[in-house]
Amino acid sequence: MSTSNEPEKKPILALPSTAEATVNMDINDTYKLKDLGPVVINEDGSMSRINNWHEMADIEKANV
């Protein structure tokens, strides 16, 4: 335990590790991110997404 007046250093949050598959993109390429589905913020602050969003029925999407 430090007795100095320095603020406690907290770890810097980082993005999740890379996906299983990567996509090469060019500067002029355009993508609609809504096709990826929602991003979920977990209780521990990590982020994930629903991988099968495009396969889910509308009722399943509404329940998520």
Image: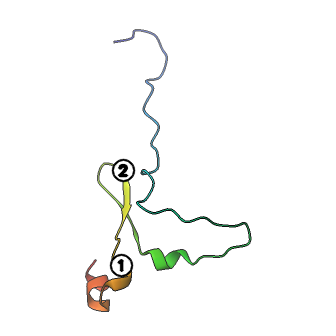
Q: Is residue 36 above or below residue 6?
A: below
- Mark 2: give few (<14), some (14-19) or many (20+) Cα within 10 Å: few
Residue 2 image offset from top left, x and y in percent: 39, 11
Q: Quadrant of residue 3?
A: top left
Q: Residue shown at 69%/67% (left/top)?
A: 26
Q: How is the image coloured?
A: rainbow
Q: Is residue 26 left or right of residue 40?
A: right
Residue type at mark 1 is Trp
Mark 2 vs 1, N-terminal side = 2
Q: Quadrant of residue 27?
A: bottom right
Q: Is residue 23 above or below residue 34?
A: above
Q: Residue shown at 64%/66% (left/top)?
A: 25
Circle 1: element type: helix
Q: What residue would you read off at disc 2?
A: 45
Q: Give the camera-side residue of 60 and 55.
A: 55
Circles 2 and 1: CB atoms closer than 8 Å: no
Q: What residue would you read off at disc 1?
A: 53
Q: Give the camera-side residue of 48 and 27.
A: 27
Q: Residue shown at 43%/24% (left/top)?
A: 8
Residue type at mark 2 is Gly
Residue 49 image offset from top left, x and y in percent: 37, 66
Residue 29 image offset from top left, x and y in percent: 68, 73
Residue lying farthest to the bottom in this orientation? 58
Looking at the rendered image, the quarter that the C terminus falls into is: bottom left
Marks 2 and 1, how far apart in space?
Answer: 21 Å
Q: Residue shown at 31%/83% (left/top)?
A: 61
